[in-house]
Amino acid sequence: MRRWNGWGDEATVVELPAHGAAFLEGLVGAGQRLPDASLQQVLAQVPESRLGSHALISVDAEVRVRHARGQSLPDWLAMRSGEFGVFPDGVALPETPAQIRELLAWAREQDVIVIPYGGGTSVAGHINPVESAKPVLTLSLERMTQLVDLDEQSQIATFGPGANGPQVEAQLRARGYTLGHFPQSWELSTLGGWVASRSSGQQSLRYGRIEQLFAGGKVETFAGTLEIPTFPASAAGPDLRELILGSEGRFGVISEVRVRVTKLAEQEHFYSVFLPSWQQAQAGVRALVQARIPLSMLRLSNAIETETQLALAGHPEQIALLEKYLALRGARAGKCMLTFGVTGNRGQNTLSVKQAKKLLKGFGGVFTGTLLGKKWAENRFRFPYLRHGLWEAGYAVDTLETATDWNNVDNLLNKVEASLRQGLADEGERVHVFTHLSHVYGQGSSIYTTYVFRPGDSYAVTQARWAKLKHAACQTIAGNRGTISHQHGVGRDHAPYLAAEKGELGMAALKAMAQHFDPESRLAPGVLLED
Ligand SMILES: Cc1cc2nc3c(=O)[nH]c(=O)nc-3n(C[C@H](O)[C@H](O)[C@H](O)COP(=O)(O)OP(=O)(O)OC[C@H]3O[C@@H](n4cnc5c(N)ncnc54)[C@H](O)[C@@H]3O)c2cc1C
């Protein structure tokens, strides 16, 4: 069963290894564990629903609790402390596009706010209800998960918007296809959510971001149904798909998603290479991508992330042997780990690996084969569970991400890391900060930073620490040519920084669009655009 106050399935537990705990203690101090509220304590706080009755809406207290928060760190703090503040008044569970239309009509008639909800994996405050004089209805797409059609000639699949990663892949794989979209939240996040928040999967290098995969579909709005037909390409004016990509529930509810799919590849392998320094590593990755060597994923950890990953991996004896081997070949302190993947047929893959190895050798790369890459692939969806292990050990962890052109990657990365590292200095607290580049483009790269800090002696102090760190990093991003989000979206948490990249006229255009589709501002108010 899905956890009500954290990530994923209750049966999956990933603990912080003893070696990892000692490593963190040395960096930020001994962990501080805050007490958790129980589900019963939270259920006791859920107020009477203000909604009238409707056959498709549940007002059950537990259903409301389970749809009240996403997965950001402040969401975690709310769930763990039991201080949710606001709950949705009910959760609608439609099964067809017609039922979504019916629910929207009902919401207008009853003067209700509507929050579209996919998998609830938002890390930017997208799906949290806020205090409102009007009742709040969360509209969950979790019953609309079917593969409706697969056009094998055009390689386009039509899905219900609520299909999550495993549901999408299982239905496609049964027919010999894949979508190839694997965000780290894959277990729980959904097609509709990916489109609405412009998601990016770990193998975007081969399959593309959701922008490239999303071919068309249907959106139910307060102004009617918007149908977006599929074309391989079109010069017929602005592309309406772009209106929906990143719309974050503000313009309408996506009721059908058409995606471009690919035949399953013959084989796939992941390799690791260690590069002696960040400068060599970054230049190597840039050269790989700019040479257009057909790889399916790249993930380059900076030196601190490399050290942290090796420490948290457990197995200290094996890691010591690896370190010895690397040192003999010139990758010592300051080394950076690169994982890359190849996906395709045997001949193509062999050639790509050969080209990548040759190129990386020129940057001092030490190739260590497929063992670490295999581990990465096996554990890629288990990493989010480690948040529990860290929390149990008394540490709070959060991530943030941006993207910028290559000529600014170092500048932005260093400034973001510094803003976080120094962020709690006034409280005498240290913050452990590390970064990787995981979505690389010819023009530039995403920058994905993780930070670990100690909770304070209360939830309020911990929340204040997070707010301070988050604000410092967001200001740094907005002030240094970074986008406020490469893949997590805007939500409520990033909305105050959006104008820095869209400009006054751009913001006015987005607001006019929201007004056009939702003239009474019923859909997800405050998300994407501050109201
Ligand atoms: C551990 C973890 C790892 C993550 N890793 C990644 C990653 O690798 N890449 C990445 O891109 N993101 C990642 N995320 C962020 C998150 O998973 C994505 O933003 C994802 O796209 C959200 O999908 P969802 O279905 O959970 O949407 P939700 O969180 O339910 O909703 C997100 C937004 O989309 C809107 N929405 C959802 N469904 C619809 C619909 N049918 N119609 C209209 N609007 C809708 C909601 O109103 C909301 O504004 C991660 C999150 C976590 C917690």
Image (spheres, rainbow, N blue to C red):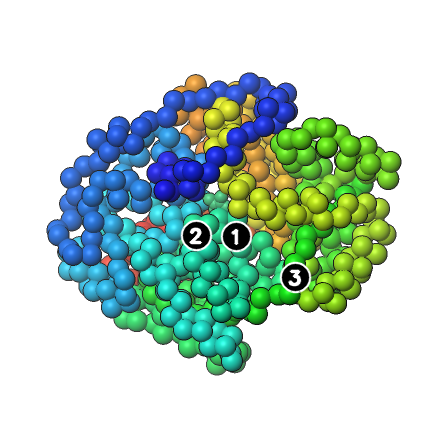
Q: Quarter-wise, where is residue 435 in the image?
A: top right
Dots 1, 2 in contact, CB < 8 A: yes
Residue that sits furthest to the front in the current view: 174
Does the residue tagged 2 have its C-beta within 8 Å of any atom of ligand 1? yes
**What's the residue at 20%, 56% (across, down)?**
56
Instruction: Residue type at mark 2: give it.
Output: Ser
Indicate the position of residue 477 as horizontal and vertical percent values.
Answer: 57, 45
Where does label 2 land, which residue? 189
Cα–Cα span, label 2 and label 3: 26 Å
Indicate the position of residue 105 as horizontal and vertical percent values.
Answer: 19, 63
Instruction: Residue type at mark 3: give it.
Output: Gln
Cα–Cα span, label 1 and label 2: 8 Å
Instruction: Residue type at mark 1: give it.
Output: Pro
Can the viewer see residue 196? no
Where does label 3 land, which residue? 267
Q: Classify residue 97 as left or right of residue 166.
A: left
- The front one of 387 and 16 is 16
Q: Classify residue 512 as left or right of residue 215.
A: left
Q: Secondary structure at mark 3?
A: strand
